[in-house]
Amino acid sequence: MTTEEIMGVPIDVITYNDIINDLPNYLHNDKKMSAISVNPQIIVEGQNHSEIYDFIEKSTHRIPDGIGIVLVSKLTGGQIKERVAGIELMVRFLDYANAYGKSIFLYGAKPEVVADAATQIEKDYPNLTLSGQIDGYTTLSEKEIIKKINQAKPDFLFVALGFPKQEKWLAKNISRLDVSVFQDVGGSFDVLSG
Ligand code: UDP
């Protein structure tokens, strides 16, 4: 996989299909995929959160999530040709989970938003398993959240706590979680909740 850098932040030259084609390698081999949105905000504001830069460096798939990223790549002779939007990638992951009977877990957003997103997803993707959900304002401790997710043992975990909370949470907790595919999804539950 080719990687480019914008202001020192690595971004992978990657398409939706490349990421989907990589899924079996992670789902069947006990490896962890972290598909992380790299957008102008994370590049600029990430400078104030050094653990986020470290996290992006270590992530397996750094997606070019913004037309600004595509433009900068073009202007500097890079190879990133198209945007990979976080919400669209989540939808492709849901399609995959539905096609192959995989399980998902939703963490984040307001209680009513995550509940509505869960209902909508179960309706639209009847063959996947929704193995759990926790809202982003829960009174559960971090330890309890980890325990709940590990008991559910989902294939996919979508984290919607907004920037920089979701990235910091993932940076800290991926190694403690029994999950194959992680994605930071910002406001995607709000969109999917309808
Ligand atoms: N959010 C959350 N807990 C928090 C802060 C935010 O669950 O402590 C949720 C928020 O309800 C929304 C999502 O994170 O569903 C994205 O938030 P925002 O739009 O602020 O972030 P962005 O999309 O700009 O990263």
Image (spheres, rainbow, N blue to C red):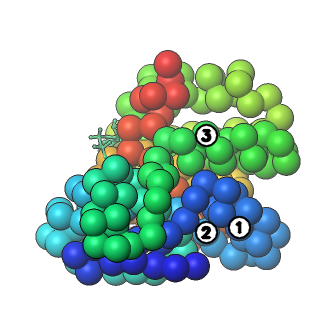
**Is any atom of residue 183 visible in this view?**
yes
Q: Secondary structure at mark 3?
A: helix
The residue that mark 1 highlights is: 22
Amino acid type at circle 2 is Met
Neighbour class for label 2 at 10 Å: few (<14), some, many (≥20)?
A: many
Write the residue at 65% across / 44% down: 92
- Quick one: label 1, few (<14), some, or many (20+) residues within 10 Å? few
- Label 2 vs label 1, nearer the camera: 1
In the figure, 26 relative to 126: above or below? below
Residue 133 position in % (x across, y down): 57, 40
Mark 2 and mark 1: Cα distance apart in space: 9 Å
Give the Cα distance between marks 3 and 2: 16 Å
State which quadrant residue 98 falls in: top right
Three-letter amino acid code at the position of disc 3: Val
Location of mark 3 (residue): 91
Ligand 1's quadrant is top left
Q: Nearer the viewer, residue 191 or 3?
A: 3
Residue drawn at 38 percent across, 45 percent down: 186
Which secondary structure lies at badge 2?
A: strand
In the image, farthest residue toward the top: 194
In the displayed structure, 121 sits above or below 130; it is: above
| Image coordinates for residue 175, horizontal then vertical, percent | 54, 76
Q: Is mark 2 within 8 Å of ligand 1?
A: no
Q: Nearer the viewer, mark 3 or mark 2?
A: 3
Numbered mark located on residue 134 in the image:
none
Asked whether disc 2 touches disc 1, contact meaning CB atoms under 8 Å apart, the reply is yes
Q: Position of residue 123 (x, y in %)?
A: 71, 21
- Res 139 quadrant in image: top left
Q: Residue at x 71, y 67 (%)?
A: 22
Measured in 3D between alpha carbons, the distance from the residue under mark 1 to the one under mark 3, in whole angstroms, is 16 Å
Residue to which mark 2 is pinned? 33
